[in-house]
């Protein structure tokens, strides 16, 4: 089977009689168990598309195309790619997909779409100018882009962790797995502190699936910023790198989050409709159910 999408991974798992969980599920459950239950147990799909998602997908593809060409061919030919056109074409395609899923309902307007596109052009140009500071060909190779993970979770042979690693690099005798993120102004200290579980999960299960020692894997978020702050006296960069802690204490902490999710939300390898699913206020900001008081009573939302 040619695996290219999360749907492909889920189909591959179902053929083995397995249930799949992704990092987005784990994070949703951590932020609000009720939102996870409504989405994945009750299967109430109240998807809200946004230009942030459209732009994020497009920027992923553009950067991956450049790096794939750079490492498999040459830097010269990578620089010849019409990345502006690819960005525009991919944004249009992803926007159309989202509109079609909303039965033709538009969720943005031309000025906003152009603003996102122009931000993307700025990111591309800075990335090309400073590429050598982030990606070198010296003792480095690109092992792959969008590498699939589909691996049994620890403690259960009926549930599989699934995901895609954006970039897998080999630097000397070490492996680096990179996740590309788009952000408005970049990640501050508070944001960094709350991130890391995704790549720690990928590290653990990439190692398990592909026969690599965990200790030989480094992890990194490659963050591209749409905007720069105005009226600052120091130069700013549109690209930020963050390497979250990935030693034994951090890995154990992430393992505990995953283990609690599996133990509380699943029974015999299946999603448990009878478990307790409290609503947490921490998950309200971007929750599609926050105004659905028939599904989630605001008075019962817990502060955690």
Image: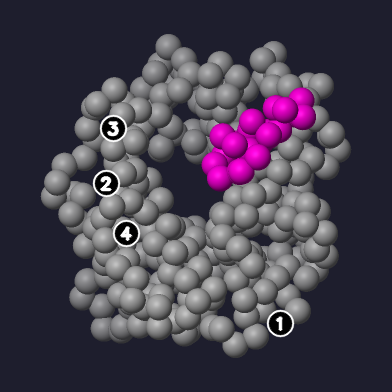
Q: Which residues are magenta?
A: 1-25
From what the image shows, is residue 282 above or below residue 14?
below
Residue annotated with mark 2: 92
> Marks 4 and 1: which is nearer the front?
4
Neighbor class of circle 2 (other Cα within 10 Å; few <14, some 14-19, many 20+) is: some
For the residues bearing labels 1 and 3, Cβ distance under 8 angstroms: no
Residue annotated with mark 3: 99
For the residues bearing labels 4 and 3, Cβ distance under 8 angstroms: no
Give the quarter of the image for residue 36.
Answer: top right
Quadrant (top left/top right/bottom left/bottom right) for the N terminus:
top right
Residue occupying image coordinates x 78% and y 71%:
216
Work out whether residue 49 or residue 274 is closer to the camera in this orientation and state it. 49
Residue 299: percent from left, percent from top: 46, 20
Q: Label 4 vs label 3: CA separation?
A: 20 Å
Whichever of callouts 4 and 1 sits on the residue coming sooner in the sequence is 4
Residue 192: percent from left, percent from top: 53, 61
Whichever of callouts 4 and 3 sits on the residue coming sooner in the sequence is 4
Work out whether residue 126 or residue 297 is closer to the camera in this orientation and state it. 126
Q: Identify the disc placed on residue 172.
A: 1
Q: Label 1 vs label 3: CA separation?
A: 45 Å
């Amino acid at each position: 089977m040619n695996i290219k999408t999360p749907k492909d991974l889920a189909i591959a798992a179902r053929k083995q009689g397995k249930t799949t969980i992704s990092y987005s599920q784990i994070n949703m459950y951590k932020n609000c168990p009720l939102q996870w239950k409504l989405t994945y147990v009750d299967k109430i799909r109240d998807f809200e598309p946004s230009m942030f998602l459209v732009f994020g997908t497009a920027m992923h593809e553009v950067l991956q195309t450049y790096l794939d060409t750079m490492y498999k061919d040459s830097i010269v030919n990578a620089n010849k790619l019409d990345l502006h056109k690819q960005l525009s074409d991919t944004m249009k395609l992803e926007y159309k997909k989202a509109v079609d899923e909303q039965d033709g309902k538009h969720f943005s307007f031309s000025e906003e779409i152009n603003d996102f596109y122009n931000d993307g052009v700025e990111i591309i140009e800075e990335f090309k100018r400073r590429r050598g500071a982030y990606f070198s060909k010296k003792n480095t190779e690109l092992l792959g882009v969008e590498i699939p993970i589909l691996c049994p979770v620890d403690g259960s042979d009926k549930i599989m962790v699934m995901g895609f690693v954006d970039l897998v690099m080999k630097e000397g005798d070490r492996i680096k797995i990179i996740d590309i993120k788009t952000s408005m102004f970049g990640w501050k200290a508070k944001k960094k502190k709350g991130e890391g579980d995704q790549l720690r999960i990928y590290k653990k299960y990439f190692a398990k699936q592909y026969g690599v020692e965990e200790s030989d894997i480094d992890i990194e978020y490659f963050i591209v910023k749409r905007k720069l702050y105005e009226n600052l006296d120091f130069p700013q960069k549109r690209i930020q790198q963050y390497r979250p802690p990935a030693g034994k204490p951090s890995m154990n902490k992430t393992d505990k989050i995953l283990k609690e999710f599996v133990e509380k939300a699943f029974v015999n390898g299946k999603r448990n409709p009878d478990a307790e699913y409290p609503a947490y206020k921490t998950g309200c900001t971007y929750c599609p159910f926050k105004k659905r008081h028939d599904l989630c009573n605001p008075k019962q939302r817990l502060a955690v």
